[in-house]
Amino acid sequence: MLTFPASKINLGLRITNKRPDGFHNLQSCFYPVAWGDILEVIPAAEFTFTSSGLSIPGNPAQNLCVKAYDLLKADFDLPPVKMHLHKIVPIGAGLGGGSADAAFTLKLLNDQFSIGLTNARLEEYARLLGSDCAFFIQNRPLYCTEKGDVFSEIAVDLRGYHILLVYPNLAISTAEAYGGIRPRQPTIPLCDQLVAPIDKWRTTIHNDFEDSLFPKYPILNQLKEQLYDSGAVYASMSGSGSTVYGIFNAPVIIPNQFSAHRVWEGKL
Ligand SMILES: C[C@@](CO)(OP(=O)(O)O)[C@H](O)COP(=O)(O)OP(=O)(O)OC[C@H]1O[C@@H](n2ccc(N)nc2=O)[C@H](O)[C@@H]1O
Ligand SMILES: Nc1ncnc2c1ncn2[C@@H]1O[C@H](COP(=O)(O)OP(=O)(O)O)[C@@H](O)[C@H]1O
């Protein structure tokens, strides 16, 4: 069976406080983007995992697709499979690409082997694999709180808009990004600000990771300004970086200044 793991952008990201478990509580709207990988799973005589495309750091046995398989195998009678991931989404990019691979593996195995797990149960498994993972079970715009794994509805609908994602060939680890954060409770909750029209967002919707990462990596703020100069209605860094995105009213002809970077343009 084939599946196409997606990616996400963060519409605003406020880190509100550090938790007793060492993680951080946050407020964000996660919004799916169609820049994705390709995953195929075929029943086989023995378990194998291979990948192609972008090179994935770390031991393949620790790949999030393998971890997702092992997690379900511990509780259900799964046969051995041959699993192949073609990696397209940049890594350390703030797009949740690895988390999406994990969540889409859970969903695929659930369907392929008729395990019968509900979305709520799949989200419980996904939470064990990473804070971002559970979002990709439903893979639709959601307001996220706590570790980014508790969801509520939000009236944000960007259908009809176009997005340009710019990845400046700079991998930022999530742990590095959280290390520079000074958590604080926003005076106005992000959910109240996000329901305003998108053309108001430039001055209200903020990603807290920009405060420490923009001074450290000046290219990130330059890209954000270039996206506004190119006509973006709203531009921001996604998640813990380093991808910077611009949202546009119409299809984007990719400006020359982005040619040194990896870019993806599409509909929201
Ligand atoms: C920042 C966000 C925002 O959407 O996404 P990315 O930009 O990385 O995609 C997420 O919080 C990333 O979630 P995810 O990438 O799943 O993180 P995890 O694997 O669970 O944790 C990696 C490390 O990040 C820190 N961490 C993560 C999530 C969280 N709510 N608080 C944290 O402090 C912890 O130091 C943890 O050890
Ligand atoms: N299938 C996978 N795709 C990407 N990264 C993976 C995968 N499995 C494990 N990882 C590990 O997860 C980390 C990056 O995860 P990713 O979700 O791409 O980050 P980010 O959301 O910050 O862009 C890397 O350290 C990488 O080694």
Image (spheres, helix red, strand yellow):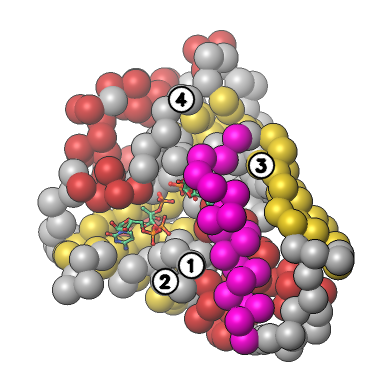
Q: Which residue is mark 3?
A: 87
Residue sitting nearer the eye, 245 or 191: 245
Prevalent SS, magenta region:
helix
- Point out residue 262 in the picture as x, y percentages from the top left corner: 57, 25
For marks 3 and 4, the one nearer the N-term is: 3
Q: Nearer the viewer, mark 1 or mark 2?
A: 1
Q: Which corner quadrant of the image does residue 241 belong to?
A: top left
Mark 3 to mark 4: distance in Å?
Answer: 17 Å
Q: Which residue is mark 2?
A: 149
Q: Which residue is mark 4?
A: 168
Q: Which residue is mark 1?
A: 129
The residue type indicated by label 3 comes to Lys
Residue drawn 50% across the image and 52% down it: 96
Mark 2 to mark 3: distance in Å?
Answer: 24 Å
Mark 1 to mark 2: distance in Å?
Answer: 11 Å
Residue sitting nearer the eye, 120 or 10: 120
The residue type indicated by label 2 comes to Asp
On screen, residue 124 above or below 186: below
- Point out residue 117 in the picture as x, y percentages from the top left corner: 67, 86
Residue drawn 35% across the image and 27% down it: 220
The residue type indicated by label 4 comes to Pro
Badge 4 marks a residue whose secondary structure is loop
Label 2 beta carbon less than 8 Å to ligand 1: yes
The residue stretch that appears in magenta: 55-75
